[in-house]
Image (tube, helix red, strand yellow):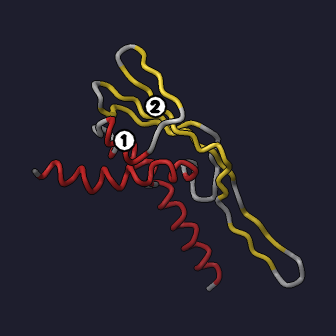
Amino acid sequence: MRQKAVVCTVACLLLTNCHSLAHKARTELIGLTRPELLSCAGVPDADETRDGQEVLVWKQDQNVDGGVSVSTPFLIGVSIAGRGTCHFVATLRDGKVSRVSYTGPSQTLYGPLAACEPLIRDCEKYARTEGASAVSQ
C-alpha cells in the first residue's frame, strides 16, 4: 500500500511539472497588450527598448522553497527540498507580448519553473479568462 502511494505521488508530481502554469503562460500570454500585462504583472523591475521591441523583466530574487519536510517526535527529520529564483521576461513588439521566457536557477520539488509561478499566476488567469471572452466577441 505504501509503495502504491509513493508511485501515485511521484506520478502526480511528474504530470504537473510537464504542464506547469509557467509552461502554459509561454503561449497563453502571447498577444496581451502592454497595459494588460502591466495590470496583471505589475510594474517591471527592468525594461529596455531595442530594435523595435521592448523587453520587460520581473524578478523573483527571494528564494522560493519547494519541498517536503517530515519530522518525528524523536528529533529525526527528513527534508526533500529545492530552492529557486526566477526572472520573468516578456518581449513586446508593436505593443503586444510576442515572447515569454524565464531565467534564473529554479530547482524546486514542484518543477524547474515553480519559482516563476508567483510572477505570472495573475496574468495567466487573466489571459485564460479575458482572452477567451475577447476572442468570442
Furthest residue in direction right, as rendered: 74
Q: Looking at the rendering, which quadrant does residue 55 occupy? A: top left
> In the depicted view, which residue is nearer to us: 4 or 124?
124
Q: CA distance from mark 1 to mark 2?
A: 10 Å
> At label 2, which amino acid type do we have?
Leu
Vertical arrangement, residue 20 with respect to residue 67, above or below:
above
| Label 1 Cα neighbours within 10 Å, binned few <14 / some 14-19 / many ≥20 | many
Residue plotted at (64% across, 59% down) = 66
Residue plotted at (58% across, 72% down) = 7
The tally of labels here is 2
> At label 1, which amino acid type do we have?
Leu
Is 5 situated left or right of 37 in this image?
right
Furthest residue in direction left, as rendered: 137
Residue for badge 2: 56
Q: Looking at the rendering, which quadrant does residue 8 occupy? A: bottom right
Vertical arrangement, residue 24 with respect to residue 99, above or below:
below
Viewport quadrant of the N terminus: bottom right
| Label 2 Cα neighbours within 10 Å, binned few <14 / some 14-19 / many ≥20 | many
| SS label for mark 2 | strand
Residue for badge 1: 37
Which sits earlier in the primary sequence, circle 1 or circle 2?
1
Is 39 situated left or right of 12 in this image?
left
Contact, CB < 8 Å: mark 1 with mark 2? yes
Vertical arrangement, residue 93 with respect to residue 72, above or below:
above
* x, y percent for residue 93: 32, 25
Residue plotted at (54% across, 35% down) = 45
Is 121 situated left or right of 13 in this image?
left
| SS label for mark 1 | helix
